[in-house]
Image: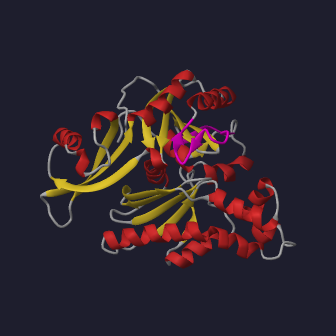
């Protein structure tokens, strides 16, 4: 979904996933062997620059972007990036059948019925028609995405200061959809859930037949587990990070660690379970085939098994490179596991092209 529908002759775009603690760059190129991850790079984002998806310091962000691109060797200046958390509103609505131009005008004129904005002139918005309503062929299902122009412009200004141009402003949840479509085979009505767990934000995207039908972001993620382990075992943040991933396998001498990790992860699991239950109740209890986990905090020890038990659905880490190759000159084999964990959103963004939906 494009907040800025800018058409350009740019040959390739670079995906940039901006999180509260790190920024990831993914450059994907088309080769004779198919889509290939040409470059991938990650750099820390200073605390306070982005909080719960909201940009607070555009100048500091511009500095991080400059450093990342200087280190990456990327030549392209066209960027695909995304919003999430409190910066963006996503709403699914049922409307009468109409053409896209008429629908855009309707959303602008009657936004108050669907979105928490008084004046749509202050908002960037887009929509996607999901298809006919299954109970009424005279109606259609539509997803509306909106963000305040002030929030969007903060990111655009930061990129401009770094000498780059944002060609597509996407949403984290839809970047996950793009990544999933490119890497997995699925049937027409097959339903999966992708849960992207970062440092301070968790994105949930329910996908049916390759298309998002339900999304939710909540501000509870891996940092909460790290902080709980720090307090419980009186260790540094770095040690707590290691403990939450390695669990008892990496720290046999620490009694109670496994239970402490699962106790700290319990609120995250509860929110995921609540979201899945809401989807099931709203969409008529349709069967969910699989749950995929992504994001830097998806490897919390025991999390996948715990979620599988609670949801009664098979749960595993997603592979954003299942059908995408990598440039062996730029990316070593040892780096791949880490990229698969943290790279899902960035790779989804890197797959975008001007003019697609």
Q: Residue at x 65, y 60 (%)?
A: 224
Q: Is residue 222 magenta?
A: no
State left or right for residue 302 relative to residue 191.
Answer: right
Instruction: Tell me where the magenta segment starts and ends, as one range.
Output: 33-56
Residue 240 horizontal/vertical position (percent) = 77, 60
**Residue 41 in view, yes or no:** yes
Quarter placement of the N terminus: top left
Front residue of 113 and 83: 113
- Which residue of the protein is positioned furthest toward the left in this rendering? 138
Does residue 290 lie above or below 98 as drawn? below
Residue 191 horizontal/vertical position (percent) = 39, 66
Q: Residue at x 39, y 24 (%)?
A: 8
Q: Is residue 38 magenta?
A: yes
Does residue 117 lie above or below 252 as drawn? above
**Residue 12 in view, yes or no:** no
Q: Residue at x 28, y 38 (%)?
A: 120
Asked where in the image residue 9 lies, by quadrant, the reply is top left
Asked where in the image residue 126 lies, by quadrant, the reply is top left
């Amino acid at each position: 979904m494009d907040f800025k529908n800018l058409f350009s002759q740019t040959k390739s775009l670079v995906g940039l996933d901006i999180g509260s603690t790190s920024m990831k760059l993914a450059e994907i190129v088309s080769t004779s062997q198919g889509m290939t991850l040409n470059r991938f790079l990650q750099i820390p984002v200073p605390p306070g620059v982005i909080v719960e998806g909201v940009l607070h310091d555009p100048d500091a962000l511009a500095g991080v972007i400059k450093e990342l691109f200087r280190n990456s060797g990327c030549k392209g200046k066209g960027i695909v990036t995304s919003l999430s958390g409190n910066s963006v509103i996503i709403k699914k609505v049922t409307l009468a059948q109409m053409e896209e131009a008429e629908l855009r005008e309707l959303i602008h004129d009657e936004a108050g019925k669907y979105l928490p904005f008084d004046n749509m002139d202050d908002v960037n918005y887009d929509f996607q028609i999901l298809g006919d309503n299954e109970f009424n062929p005279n109606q259609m299902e539509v997803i509306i995405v909106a963000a305040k122009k002030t929030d969007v412009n903060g990111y655009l200004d930061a990129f401009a200061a770094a000498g780059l141009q944002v060609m597509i402003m996407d949403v984290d949840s839809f970047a996950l959809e793009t990544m999933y479509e490119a890497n997995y085979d699925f049937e027409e009505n097959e339903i999966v859930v992708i849960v992207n767990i970062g440092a301070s934000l968790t994105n949930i995207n329910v996908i049916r037949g390759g298309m998002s039908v339900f999304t939710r972001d909540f501000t509870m993620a891996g940092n909460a587990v790290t902080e709980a382990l720090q307090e419980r075992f009186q260790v540094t943040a770095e040690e707590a990070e290691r403990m939450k991933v390695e669990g008892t396998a990496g720290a046999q001498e620490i009694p109670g660690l496994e239970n402490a990790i699962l106790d700290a992860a319990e609120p995250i699991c509860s929110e995921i379970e609540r979201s899945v239950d809401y989807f099931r109740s709203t969409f008529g209890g349709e069967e969910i085939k699989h749950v995929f986990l992504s994001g830097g905090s998806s490897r919390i020890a025991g999390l996948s098994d715990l979620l599988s038990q609670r949801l009664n659905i098979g749960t595993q880490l997603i592979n954003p490179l299942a059908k995408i190759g990598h440039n062996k000159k730029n990316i070593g084999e040892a780096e791949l596991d880490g990229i698969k964990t943290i790279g899902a959103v960035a790779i989804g963004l890197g797959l975008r092209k001007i003019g697609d939906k």
